[in-house]
């Protein structure tokens, strides 16, 4: 703890406003993970809000400097992370009652526009529900309705879900 | 700063070993960004080591609980992030002397095996160098040589690289 | 012509019903090409019916033994051909008034079900209309409404369309 | 047969050189199918030559007007057909001794250059051999060595191969 505090002091001394905001975000993320409000560190850190509506999963997340690529735009990989989650959550929610889960085997992403707003919304839905393989699509839009990216993904059903552990 | 310290205290009180390790990693990441050892927060946080060898870019990164999905395996989106970086860095390094850059327009990823080792290596190389469009491939392997994922990506040349800001 | 007639006789002697039907289809296809009812041999041979409705292109085609793979199902490549056409026709119809055209740079296809009916319907629509790049999606369904395949494609605008000749 | 002959006459009267060449090709293709030199009409019609070398499958095929798109270039779907075959033949050859087969579940294709030569060579090899899923890649090049397209594909193992009939 002393080591952490001393590190925190060093970091704080040279900190920009963005540095401080990200640090605060990160501490809150760890806290959410501790309180089980978030199932993974990654979800907590990316501040994903997850909603299910009918046959879709909608994940909303704020754009912070943590997600920036070298052009100060949301990194394609972060967008991929959120799309993979939106599709994967939908699939796993639906398979859970059967004691099953699913893992991503393929994801294809078209990036169509650099994001310019402060949050993004990923909406996932089914293209095909097979016994062994599920295919979904996911669009990422801005609050102004503009599409930023579109993905399709293949998921392979595993049984039980944690067999790979 | 007081707010941060008090938050740090709360977090530390309930912290698991993983929580503490991630916090330390995060503070070091911010420090690297402050010292410009890392160009983005994301690279620093994911602890990416970037090397160029001939016509390839090799990005190595450790698997920490920060990257875990709900099955405690490296998240496909984090793997996508690192692959996008390996391909994007190679492309942008080669275009920089001409005052140009490139953005990802398409990425397709096959996830073939759940990772079981403590670090991963993404190796990117060219499939095609066009005037406007570049196509690359990237494989992610473990230190034991096993392939975890394979991606191909399309990149569109922009001029100047920061025109989208 | 004599050579053709003699070849036709040889083929006809050993011909199955399918052989004869395909031969007839092929001759009719050549005729359609001669009469400019079809722009390419391939469209004529695959008997594609092309319709535009609002912002979609709908291509319908019969399944004949010509399209069969080794499992006597429509070949994935033939399905890809028709999807590429449906997307490409939509794009090129819309770009023609500007004296432009577009070529496919990427196509990603999920095959979700083996076809069991006698015709297939490919429906293409836009996901994104950019200045240089267009992204479309295309679903292939049976008359009974079941989805057989789903594709997304990237198209790159060229000017003039026949510049590559 | 009389109907066919009369149709042949009509077609021949108005036939261009390309029409006549394609007709001859088609008759020879039917003949190959009759003699079981070719397993499918499609392979015979596209004149695919299939070779296995070590862990690859190499399919060579001539470019004829039958394969042309509206720009008089080999259609992306025909290139997809041949790539799907090269990957699928490799997979099915290797699974046959076990009494199994595999079907394409996903194919992603980057088209990088319009073909300018008279034949194309598709070379398929493995990226991953799993128990249920196989991932392959395939490059299409010209005799001059230039790459025209690159694909990756996922194949799902089925048992027995003709179970879907």
Image (tube, coloured by chain):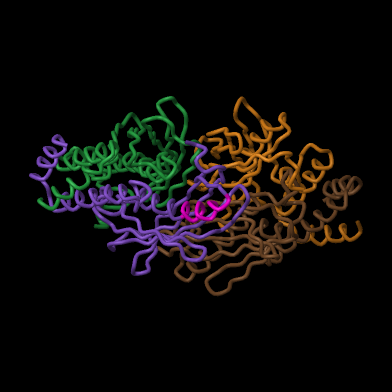
Chain colours: A brown, B orange, C purple, D green
- Per the rendered image, the range of residues in magenta is C87-98
User: What's the residue at 31%, 41% (across, down)?
Assistant: D89
- Considering depth in this image, is C136 or A115 the residue closer to the camera? C136
Residue B61, image quadrant: top right
D119 on left or right of B29 = left
Task: Decide whether residue C93 is among the magenta residues.
Answer: yes
Residue C92 on the magenta segment: yes
Residue sitting at x 40%, y 30%: D117
Asked if residue A1 lies left or right of residue D75, the reply is right
Can residue A14 be seen by looking at this rendering? Answer: yes
Comparing A161 with D32, the one in front is D32
- Residue shown at the point (77%, 44%) measured from the top left: B29
Q: Which quadrant: the C terminus of chain D?
A: bottom left
Percent x, y of residue C8: 13, 42
Image location (x, y in percent) of residue B41: 76, 46
Please tell me how many numbered marks the rendered image carries: 0
Left or right of D152, for residue D100 = left
C62 in relation to C26, above or below: below
């Amino acid at each position: 703890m002393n080591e952490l505090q001393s590190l925190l002091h060093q970091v704080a001394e040279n900190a920009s406003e963005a540095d401080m905001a990200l640090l605060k975000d990160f501490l809150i993320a760890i806290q959410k993970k501790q309180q089980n409000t978030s199932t993974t560190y990654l979800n907590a850190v990316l501040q994903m809000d997850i909603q299910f509506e009918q046959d879709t999963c909608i994940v909303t997340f704020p754009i912070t400097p943590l997600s920036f690529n070298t052009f100060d735009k949301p990194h394609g990989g972060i967008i991929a992370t959120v799309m993979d989650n939106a599709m994967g959550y939908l699939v796993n929610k639906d398979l859970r009652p059967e004691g099953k889960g699913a893992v991503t085997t393929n994801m294809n992403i078209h990036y169509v526009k650099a994001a310019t707003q402060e949050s993004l919304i990923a909406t996932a839905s089914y293209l095909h529900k097979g016994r062994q393989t599920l295919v979904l699509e996911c669009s990422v839009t801005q609050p102004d309705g503009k599409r930023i990216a579109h993905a399709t993904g293949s998921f392979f059903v595993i049984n039980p879900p944690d067999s790979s552990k």
